[in-house]
Amino acid sequence: MGQAISDMNAGRTDVAAEICAGILSRASAYPPAHQLLAVIYLAQGRLSDASHHILSSLKPRPDHVPSLLIAAKVARAEHDLVAAMGYLRRAMSLGPREPEPLYQSGLVLLEQGQLAAAVDVLKLLVSLHPSHAHGWFSLGTALQQSSLCEAASVALLRSIELQPQQAEAWFALGLVQQDMRDFSGAATAFRTALQYRPDFAEAAVNLGIVLQVCGACEEAFNAYQKAYQIRPETFGRIASALTSGPSGRLWLDLSILRQLLAAI
């Protein structure tokens, strides 16, 4: 089993899976082998196999918190949020101060649209673990979706202080500042998101929108060009922004707009 874990950590997942299969051929109920196979298959998107192995891992040890967390991730990947929450509640009851059950619970509650509950869980997480950057980011997301923009901004800034290169956190901060009509701050946040993730099409679109609102039309169009060249599917949002904003333009022939956006 130690060799399988070493191979897994070195990226040799096929070798690790083969070792685990060999172990299970001799000891079919051995929980660690089932657990590692579940991790491998979850990463490969083989959700049915991952589910089978993590349930086999849990059968002889139903209170094993790492396996409960993996089971929750598999259920979440299968869009069974009720089952995921069940595993997480069990994990939280066994380790009420552990960060991972709280963090995953916050994510599931967000996906379920239970914003108040998500905020409560994520606030507990960051109070117990103040350096949990992703916890602060998720809390900021929950607060933003609850229309609590100032509190969301504080949480997102804390996340960025802990991990400055989080493009998604910078993007979320830009959205909050956009909602607060701090367009200059939003532009800076979106630019920083693109600095850390140059293929972040959504950040480029939103950068164009806030620059357009500020009257910086040439810079806005450059941002729209970048977004379109990253992902042509952004054309609809770009066209809508260009034609609806106070500094926009009316395009009678959208094919010409496409050509201009595609030009390098």
Image (cartoon, rainbow, N blue to C red):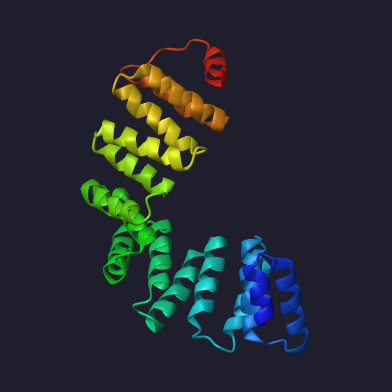
Q: In the shown orientation, is residue 75 left or right of residue 177? A: right
Residue most extreme to the top: 252
- Residue 14 picture quarter: bottom right
The structure residue drawn at horizontal position 41% and vertical position 50%, both measured from the top left corner, is 166
Toward which corner of the image does residue 3 lie, by quadrant? bottom right
Nearer to us in this view, 184 or 88: 184
- Looking at the image, can residue 146 be seen? no
Residue 206: percent from left, percent from top: 39, 33
Q: Answer yes or no: is residue 76 visible.
A: yes
230 w.r.t. 214: above or below: below
Is 220 left, or right, of 18 in this rendering? Answer: left
The quadrant of the rendering that contains the N terminus is bottom right
Find residue 143 and report its horizontal and vertical position in percent. Answer: 28, 53
Residue 226 vertical position relative to residue 243 in the rendered view, above or below: below
Q: Quadrant of residue 209?
A: top left
Q: Residue at x 38, y 71 (%)?
A: 99
Q: Residue at x 74, y 84 (%)?
A: 23
Q: Quadrant of the C terminus?
A: top right
Residue at the farthest left position: 150
Identify the residue at image location x=57%, y=83%.
Answer: 58
The answer to whether 2 is drawn above or below residue 15 in the figure is below
| Residue sitting nearer the eye, 160 or 239 | 160
x%, y% of residue 28?
72, 86
Q: How many marks?
A: 0
